[in-house]
């Protein structure tokens, strides 16, 4: 885990997608301690004419992004999540240039019994790892 859903208001390209995936995978691993090999990322591009901040289309303005990341509840501290929000914004600003202040990172703490991977919930994995 985790699962990341990224929306970008920049021009789509395979290089941009790869760079965004690299940045997010690196930061998710380094700051939140998530396994690189289980970090799944979906990237969507929204044309600036379809992205609005303050009821104004971004066409001709600074880019924006929205990142929604789902992690298992209780696996990260407030400080780790705050650092992650800061560093994602800073890394994307270095990559894409000045960004809209209204560019968001949402870290969703999802209960362990409500999601998982490979057909097993995170809660199941936790219980299975307990010593007998």
Image (tube, rainbow, N blue to C red):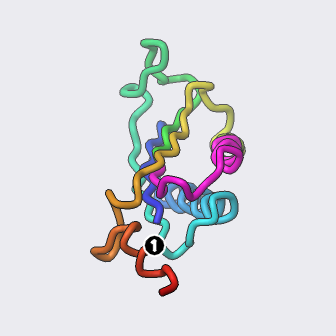
Q: Is-magenta flag for residue 82?
A: yes
Q: Is residue 14 left or right of residue 30?
A: left
User: In terms of image quadrants, where is residue 30?
Assistant: bottom right
Question: Looking at the picture, how far across and down is residue 78, in whole percent?
Answer: 65, 44
Q: Quick one: 92 or 38, which is closer to the camera?
A: 38
Point 32% across, 76% down: residue: 118
Q: Quick one: 53 or 10, which is closer to the camera?
A: 53
Question: Looking at the picture, how far across and down is residue 55, in whole percent?
Answer: 42, 12
Q: Is-magenta flag for residue 32?
A: no
Point 63% across, 65% down: residue: 33
- Farthest residue to the bottom: give it: 132
- Farthest residue to the top: give it: 55
Q: Quick one: 74 or 106, which is closer to the camera?
A: 74
Instruction: Identify the residue position indicated by label 1 in the image.
Output: 126
In the image, residue 56 sits, relative to residue 84, either above or below, namely: above
Point 52% across, 38% down: residue: 65
- Farthest residue to the front: give it: 132
- Farthest residue to the left: give it: 119
| Bounds of the magenta segment | 69-88
User: In terms of image quadrants, where is residue 45?
Assistant: top left
Badge 1, how many Cα within 10 Å: few under 14, some, many 20+?
few
Question: Looking at the picture, how far across and down is residue 126, in whole percent?
Answer: 45, 72
Number of labelled discs? 1
Q: In this view, does 12 lie to the left or right of 77?
A: left
Question: Looking at the picture, how far across and down is residue 11, in whole percent?
Answer: 48, 43
Point 51% across, 84% down: residue: 131
Could you say whether the residue bearing mark 1 is in a helix, strand or loop?
helix
């Amino acid at each position: 885990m985790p699962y990341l859903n990224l929306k970008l208001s920049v021009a789509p390209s395979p290089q941009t997608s790869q760079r965004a995936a690299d940045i997010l995978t690196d930061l998710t691993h380094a700051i939140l301690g998530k396994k690189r090999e289980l970090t799944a990322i979906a990237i969507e591009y929204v044309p600036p004419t379809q992205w609005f901040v303050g009821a104004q289309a971004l066409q001709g303005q600074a880019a924006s992004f929205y990142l929604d990341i789902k992690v298992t509840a209780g696996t990260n501290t407030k400080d780790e999540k705050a650092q992650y929000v800061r560093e994602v914004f800073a890394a994307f600003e270095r990559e894409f240039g000045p960004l809209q202040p209204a560019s968001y990172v949402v870290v969703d703490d999802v209960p362990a019994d409500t999601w998982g991977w490979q057909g097993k919930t995170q809660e199941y994995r936790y219980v299975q790892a307990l010593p007998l």
